[in-house]
Amino acid sequence: MKKALWLLAVLALSGCETPVTKDEMDAYNYGPKPANWQDEIRSYLSLRLRDPKSAIVEFRTEPKQFYQRQVALDPEQHGWAVCVWVNDKNGEGAYEGFRPMTFFLRNEKIVAANNDPDHRGPIYAEYAKRQCASLGAPFKE
C-alpha cells in the first residue's frame, strides 16, 4: 500500500513538472559526442545485472544532448543521453521483461543513469520512460 501511495505522489508531482528550457540546455558544456558509448554501457551493465551474459540489451537511440533537473535527492545531470531497454533474468532464471534505462555520458564515461540496477524505483522508472520518449524511443509496457 505504501508503494502505491508513493507512486501516486510521484506521478502527481511529476505532472506539475515544466519542460526543460533551451536556456537550461544551453547552460552546459556536453563535450564531444561519445564514440564508444555502447561498449561503456555494456561494461557498466556487466557489473550490475544478475545474468549479464544472457541479458538482452537493446540500444534504442543514439546519444543526444540532454539535461535532467534534480531527481529526488540526486543532483541535476547533463550529458549525452541514450535510451536502452534491458531484459535481465530473475533469481529463478526467467526473463523479467524489458525495462527502460537512460544513461548520461560525458567524456566517454557514464556520469548518471535512471532505472538501472543501482537506481531502481518508481521515480527512476518514470524518468527513464519519459526520457526514452523524449529521445525518440517511447516505452510501452
Image (cartoon, rainbow, N blue to C red):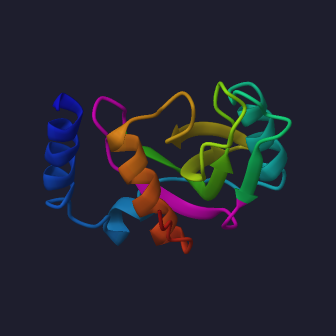
- The tally of labels here is 0
Give the x, y percent position of residue 94.
Answer: 69, 38
Query: Is 43 in front, or is 2?
Result: 2
In the image, taking residue 109 as reference, residue 136 lies left or right, namely left
Up-down relation of residue 26 to residue 85 (above or below): below
Instruction: State which region is magenta.
Output: 59-75
Up-down relation of residue 117 to residue 84 (above or below): above
Query: Is 7 in front, or is 90?
Result: 90
In the image, taking residue 12 as reference, residue 37 lies left or right, namely right
In the image, taking residue 136 as reference, residue 134 lies left or right, namely left
Query: Is 25 in front, or is 137?
Result: 137
Q: Is residue 93 magenta?
A: no
**At 33% across and 42% down in the image, what residue appears?**
123
In the image, taking residue 77 as reference, residue 11 lies left or right, namely left
Q: Is residue 64 magenta?
A: yes
**At 67% across and 65% down in the image, what residue appears?**
60
Give the x, y percent position of residue 3.
Answer: 23, 33
**At 28% across and 35% down in the image, what residue appears?**
72
The secondary structure that dominates the magenta segment is loop
Residue 33 visible in this rendered orientation of the protein: no
Residue 41 visible in this rendered orientation of the protein: yes
Query: In the image as oriented, which residue stretches furthest toward the bottom?
Result: 136
**At 60% across and 53% down in the image, what residue appears?**
98
Give the x, y percent position of residue 4.
Answer: 20, 40
Q: In what quadrant of the picture does the N terminus appear? A: top left
